[in-house]
Image: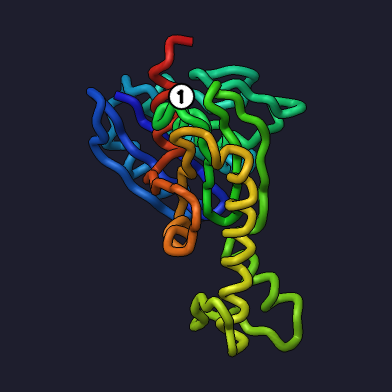
């Protein structure tokens, strides 16, 4: 059995995988990491655990401590120059976020064509993966809620716009904020897709808690892939090297 754990800035997601299928899964707030012990108590002691952590050293230490009591085979995914058919062209490959690396590995397992890998969460990452499996570069920008929060926190007159809606031509402040934040996300994605738009089978692979906000408005070929990071972790754990 493989146990994949994705520790993000806001949430920790986990899933168990065996025999080519998902068996169980769960999610909790990253601040509630101690509750991961309840799930871990149900996992077999001999399972292989692979972790992607972008929530900092304290969370990494917490996960290691929780799992040390039962799981002997725990590894943390570290970005490398090459893994699972993906080549990392970052100037310093080790500086790529582990979540982005896992998502790229997961994307390569999903498609042999050029694709744009979009993880929409607390931050939004937009990464270009060509048909040869080369990660050519990508963007990091504030996620939708971070954008809204920044406007509310750093201006005197603008609200968080909880009730706003996406409009092509917004005519009130809440709609203007929601539409502006979404257009910023959509514009980044669509501009990054442009270099591969003419390639056969090219598409955008979307994942993350905020991905649903984008899919209704994208003007490029896309596919929503649940748990792409967890899929990449399983792919990595199953690889021979």
Quadrant position of the N terminus in the picture: top left
Say which quarter of the image contains residue 92: top right
**Element carrying mark 1:** strand
Q: Which residue is mark 1?
A: 74
Q: Residue 124: image x %, image y %?
A: 59, 52
Asked if 2 appears above or below 41 in the picture, the reply is above
Residue at 58% in and 38% down: 196
Say which quarter of the image contains residue 14: top left
Residue at 59% in and 89% down: 172
Q: Residue 164: image x %, image y %?
A: 52, 81
Say which quarter of the image contains residue 71: top left
Asked if 208 appears above or below 15 in the picture, the reply is below
Residue at 57% in and 66% down: 182
Residue 43 falls left or right of residue 121:
left
Residue at 63% in and 84% down: 159
Q: Residue 115: image x %, image y %?
A: 51, 36
Tally of marks = 1
Residue 195 falls left or right of residue 22:
right
Residue 150 falls left or right of residue 63:
right
Q: Is residue 177 visible?
A: yes
């Amino acid at each position: 059995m493989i146990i994949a754990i994705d520790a993000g800035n806001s949430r920790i997601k986990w899933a168990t995988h065996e025999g080519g299928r998902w068996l169980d899964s769960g999610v909790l707030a990253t601040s509630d990491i101690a509750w991961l012990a309840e799930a871990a108590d149900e996992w077999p002691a001999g399972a292989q655990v692979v972790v992607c952590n972008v929530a900092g050293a304290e969370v990494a230490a917490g996960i290691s401590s929780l799992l040390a009591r039962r799981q002997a085979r725990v590894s943390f995914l570290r970005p490398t120059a090459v893994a699972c058919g993906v080549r990392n062209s970052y100037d310093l490959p080790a500086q790529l976020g582990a979540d982005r690396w896992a998502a790229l590995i997961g994307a390569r397992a999903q498609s042999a064509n050029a694709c744009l890998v979009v993880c929409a969460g607390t931050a939004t990452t937009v990464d270009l993966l060509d048909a040869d499996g080369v990660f050519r570069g990508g963007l990091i920008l504030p996620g939708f809620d971070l954008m809204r929060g920044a406007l509310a926190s750093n201006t005197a007159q603008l609200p968080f716009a909880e009730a706003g809606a996406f409009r092509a031509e917004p005519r009130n402040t809440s709609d203007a904020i929601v539409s502006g934040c979404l257009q910023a996300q959509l514009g980044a994605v669509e501009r990054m897709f442009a270099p591969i738009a003419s390639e056969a089978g090219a598409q955008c692979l979307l994942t993350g808690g905020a991905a649903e906000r984008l899919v209704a408005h994208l003007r490029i070929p896309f596919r929503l892939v649940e748990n792409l990071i967890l899929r990449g972790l399983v792919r990595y754990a199953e690889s021979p090297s």
